Amino acid sequence: MSEDIGIDLGTANIIIYIKGKGIVLREPSIIAVNKDTNEVIAVGDEANKMLGRTPNNIEVIKPLKDGVISNFTLTAKMIKHYIKKVSKKSFFAPRIMICVPSQITEVEKRAVLDVAMQSGAKRVYLIEEPVAAAIGAGIDITKPSGNLVIDIGGGTTDVAVISMNSAVMSTSIKFAGNRIDETIIRYFKKRHRILIGEKTAQHIKKTIGCAYPRVENIGMKARGRNLTNGLPAEIEISSEELMKPIVNDCMRIVEAVKSTIEKTPPELVEDISNKGIYMTGGGSLLHGIDKLIQKNTGIKVTVADDAISCVAIGTGKALNNLDLLDEKNKKQKTDN
């Protein structure tokens, strides 16, 4: 018997949910390839360990960029690897539901469908990320009432007003957690003349990064390469110093939220004012970003429990409706 699989195909991480089992895999969206032979050397956690540490003939690649597929072949290989890893006992092709950004183009949508079919799916379904995030956060989206959800991933931030199971108004920007990492790298390079890697930038962001003043200014030591003499260097950096460039970045998310609210029907805006804004995704865990949004909108902001897994959990819960979708598709074909 085949399994129904839900995939949160993120720019930074892939999370897989199997119906009846829950989340069974959570690994980086990254793959290592031998450039001479095109052979896949490693995928996920193993490939991530190689980042910045490989010889010239091995390339570590992130095949998704800004929420969409940038390398079709490698994305297909990566998904196929993960499906095989989590479906060892299944002899039949699975039905797969994949979440996608709310403003995805038809070309990008087709790429996701094609890559899933090439990965061995029997049938593929798509669900918008903010809708899946809302379901995963435990929000009742079936009623005619407005719910504002912000899903901050690695490559995209999706802002959507959801009512009666669908997005009434949505905004998707190609700016999220990865761009903040890039900002930290640029800041170190320009301000301190030190070059740091992606992993170091991400560690700094998670440890002392903030989008709103902390109660107590904290610091940490960061190591990199001195751009003046090429030697290893170490400096002390504080959360207060790093906050300014991070806030400048996060204001793009704030503007996306405000823009979405401005375009939303007043009845739904009233609902949102009463219930507040919900945040999901790994980017929502950046210290103080909820307070920054709350300050600039005047609306209460709540970060969902297990924010990183909300999209995957919502996609998984949506698997319960696959039989209904299949029946609907059959009826439409019969009518035509």
Image: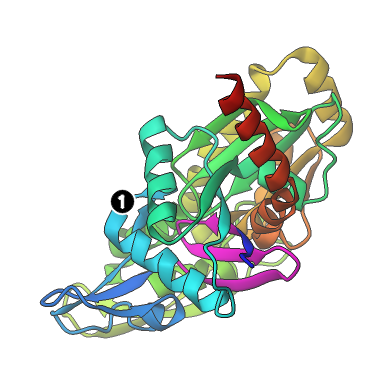
Q: Nearer the viewer, residue 41 or 204?
A: 41
Q: Is residue 126 left or right of residue 70?
A: right
Q: Quadrant of the C terminus?
A: top right
In this rendering, the answer to whether 255 lies above or below 189 is above
Image coloring type: rainbow
In this rendering, the answer to whether 77 lies above or below 158 is below
Q: Amino acid at mark 1?
A: Ser
* Segment tinted magenta in the rendering: 6-29
Residue 99 spot, x, y in % from top left: 56, 48
Residue 111 spot, x, y in % from top left: 37, 44
Residue drawn at (58%, 65%), measured in percent from left and top? 15
Residue 228 is drawn in which quadrant?
bottom left
Residue drawn at (22%, 77%), measured in percent from left and top? 39
Residue drawn at (69%, 52%), measured in percent from left and top? 319
Residue drawn at (46%, 44%), measured in percent from left and top? 175
Residue 125 spot, x, y in % from top left: 56, 44
Q: Quadrant of the N terminus?
A: bottom right
Q: Is residue 26 left or right of residue 115?
A: right
Q: Is residue 3 left or right of residue 118?
A: right
Residue 319 in sight from this viewpoint:
yes
Instruction: Let me know if residue 21 is in the magenta part.
Output: yes
Q: Main SS of the magenta segment?
A: strand
Q: Nearer the viewer, residue 152 or 134?
A: 134
Instruction: Let me know if residue 30 is in the magenta part.
Output: no
In this rendering, the answer to whether 127 lies above or below 96 is above
* Disc 1 packing (10 Å; few <14; some 14–19; many ≥20): some
Residue 19 spot, x, y in % from top left: 71, 63
Residue that carries the numbered disc 1 in the rendered image: 70
